[in-house]
Amino acid sequence: MLRDFYHFLRTLTPTEQVAALFFIVFGLLVVISVGAFLMTFRTEGRAKDPKWHEELADFRRLLGTSWVMVVIFWIGWAAGHVVATLLFAAIAFFALREFITLSPTRRGDHRSLVLAFFVVLPVQFWLAATRHFDLFTVFIPVYVFLAIPLVSALGGDTQRFLERNAKLQWGIVVCVYGMSHVPALLLLDFPQRNYVGKGAFLVFFVVFVVQTCMVVQHLLARRSQRPPSIPTVSRSFHWTSWLLGMAVGSMAGGALTFITPFAPGQAVAMAFIACAAGSLGHLVMKALKRDRGVPAWGHRASVTGANGLLDRVDALCFAAPVFFHSVRWYFGV
């Protein structure tokens, strides 16, 4: 039966295949969400254990993040490339706003901030939407890297000059450069492998394997009796649980090879790259939060207006560019 279903999916057009994929994903999320909801009615066994309730709350937060990500990608795919690019540009805008809100600035930074929000961000996403991938890949790392400190220097404020510009450049690279690679993935075609108009599958592939790696890592770390490996950065990070999460995420990528242009071994390798970039990028963002002395980006006490958005997309901001450039380099597209 599975073979017949697989052959049926092969007969569909790329648009119908992507629609079927979203239908299956939404169905799985509904089933898992109903199961998580029913577990709250348990009155026996571990239901009286506060730790069990804490784990269930963590799982529901992860599930909520998955719902948000899938709905965003569905809207982006259903509304077309232009709306998808605008949608992810808006996400990058609010994520950068959260980042800057927790990085104190001075009056001399105002010109650089205007440049970042109203010039760099729109240009970067315009380059992605118009498939100018050669300039798209170097615009921020090369030209913006030089332009930001130049504009700051013209402001005439040299106090903590290097620190202020480094923070702004970090925010641009993570929030704008990283997020801009998601709509770029939607436009990535592999004509030599007859893989055209299926970029949504690549986005799903990256999100699914990274989320799988993160969830497995998180659940194993919660049950581990060992002390955290890097307690000054994360109280839940263990190298063993990270390696197991990487292994499960990579195998999940191998299982999804049929929706990618990759051979099974290539799918495992690409999933490994995405998982490593996403999970370790998430660890880096935790270090930045520790440095700022906050438990989450966009805390309720802040004024960003987009509570915790960067927490939801930080792993994707690291995984998407590394995956995009690895695929382009290896397959020459």
Image (cartoon, helix red, strand yellow):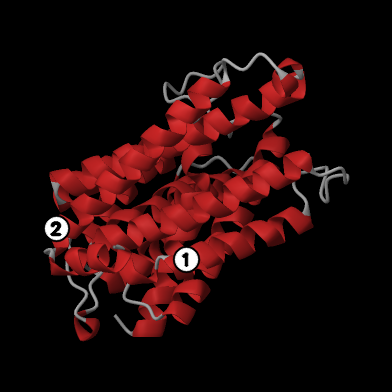
262 in relation to 29, above or below = below
Q: CA distance from mark 1 to mark 2?
A: 22 Å
Q: Position of residue 225 (x, y in %)?
A: 87, 42
Query: Can residue 141 be seen at all in this image of the molecule?
Result: no
Name which residue lies at 53% across and 69% down.
273
Query: Can residue 241 be seen at all in this image of the molecule?
Result: yes
Name which residue lies at 55% across and 56% down.
278
Callout 1: SS? helix
Of pointers 1 and 2, the one earlier in the residue sequence: 2
Callout 2: SS? helix
Quadrant including the N terminus: bottom left
Left or right of 70: which side holds 264? right
Left or right of 32: which side holds 83? left
Quadrant including the C terminus: bottom left
Q: Position of residue 200 (x, y in %)?
A: 27, 57
Give the amino acid type for the residue marked by disc 1 in the picture. Answer: Gly
Left or right of 77: which side holds 231? right
Q: Position of residue 75 (x, y in %)?
A: 22, 40
Give the amino acid type for the residue marked by disc 2 in the picture. Answer: Thr
Of the numbered discs in the image, which one, if any, rests on residue 253? 1
